[in-house]
Image (spheres, helix red, strand yellow):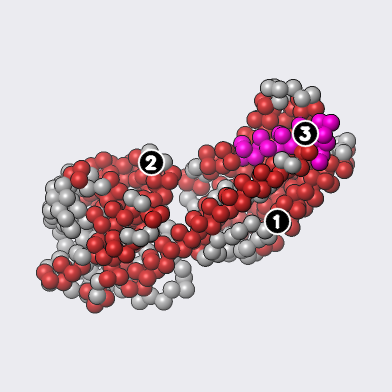
Amino acid sequence: MGTIPAGARVYVACVVLAALACLGPLPAVPTPWWIVALLAALYAGCERITLPHGPRGAAARAAERRAPQGLGTFLPVLLAGAFLLPPPAAALVALPGALLARVEQRPRGLRRTWRAAQLAVAVWAASGVHWALDGRDAVVGPRFPYALVPAGAAVLTFCLVLTVLDGGILALAERVPVRGAWRGLFSRSLAPVAVHGLAGLMMAVLWRSPYGPVAALLVLLPMYVSCWVFAQYHRERAAHQATIRALVQAVDIKDGYTRGHSERVGQASMMIARELGMDDERAEVLRFAGILHDVGKLGVPTRLLRKDGPLTPDERRIIELHPEYGHEMVRGIGFLGEARSAILHHHERLDGSGYPYGLVGGQIPEFARVVAVADAFDAMTSTRSYRRARPVPAALAELERCAGAQFDPGMVGALVRALDRDGWHPAVTAGDDLTTPPVPRPTDSTPPAPRPTDSTPADSSGRRSP
């Protein structure tokens, strides 16, 4: 939400009005104000606790935008309020902490307002479900295991409301395609919220027990430790993203003709990974492979990368060294894992005529076979200095024609299915402050693309062969 579109501002205003409506009945509801004040102060204090932060660059901000909102907060306090208080009072607990929380990005006031309204609505809904299922009596009892039923329903409601609101802001403020705005948000946030919900239930039960609120506060100590570990994980992840972004920017500066190509290949590789059913961790590493597949171009002379005419055989042999250069560059980056083999082998072909080692069929690593398809697809659908971009259907038809000889048919089929379902919406997030050579735009005199042969359906290296 760096520059907030008008639609997103209207959306935030509607959520704020919804939050105010949740608080509206508060004067008429019997409320234990001392519990509200204590929980609100506790939540505000927890929000002000400094946790380690990672680099604040573009990569970190992008990862921050993709994460479900609210998972970095001390949700046990909010959920304990949902279990102990009537819905309007529970919603009030979230406001001071959310409005006082640290915000890194501008506009800070709007972001704080959005977060406060979002959490207030989510807590109100969770408390309403909990009370509707007689959860308050179960906590006071306590009546186990029945107390887990209303608590579980409240946690699901809380998570669902956050997911719905997050997807809306992603679609409107971040311009994420509507089909993909909500994808994965609920599944990624449910497990962490469930853990926080159990801690909140423990707080509520201890609060109502003879041990009182002091014992309930002890639950926060292990939760703080878990939040610290979570923050450390994100700090390491942001450092990984910053490392990759620096390498990609270096390639984009050197080869301005293909700026954004690396990120689009990473995006297409991720689409294939999801279609193949890869788990999130492997899919993320595969995205890294797609983004870094051309990092070896840093070792290729710039004059060859920017040459407009056909390459000589010697020049082509030099460019064909870039997978090996790239593999050497990332050899010591441990978190890349399988991505390293994709960087080395993404120009291999199933029939053994590829490079650098002429691997055949199943000898080619799975990640390399995915990146090869994503790389060729983006090369064909992008405008280059010597030809216009092809339409997506034409590029897919060419991939299918070459499946079995050059490309893995399974990977081609996965890309076709993903594009049929979601379409192709390439998102390039390279920093605007980069100084890169302008990409020549084709004119009416630009010669048409040469007819691909069986051996080269798409020259993903970015230059014509002689």
Kindly identify the amino acid type of the residue bearing the numbered disc 2: Met
Would you identify the image quadrant in which residue 193 lies?
top right
Q: Tell me what residue is drawn at x 34 percent, y 40 percent.
A: 276
Kindly identify the amino acid type of the residue bearing the numbered disc 1: Ile
| Residue 136 at least partly seen | yes
| Residue 351 x/y as whole percent | 13, 48
Q: Residues within 10 Å of mark 2 (few under 14, many from 20)?
A: some
Q: Nearer the viewer, mark 2 or mark 1?
A: 1
Mark 1 or mark 2, which is nearer the start of the sequence?
Answer: 1
Q: Residues within 10 Å of mark 1 (few under 14, many from 20)?
A: few
How many marks are shown on the rendered structure? 3
Q: Quadrant of the C terminus?
A: bottom left
Mark 2 to mark 1: distance in Å? 36 Å
Q: Where residue 49 is drawn, which disc sits there?
A: 1
Q: Tell me what residue is drawn at x 58 percent, y 53 percent.
A: 231
Task: Determine which residue is flagged by label 2.
Answer: 278
| In this view, 374 is above or below 191 | below
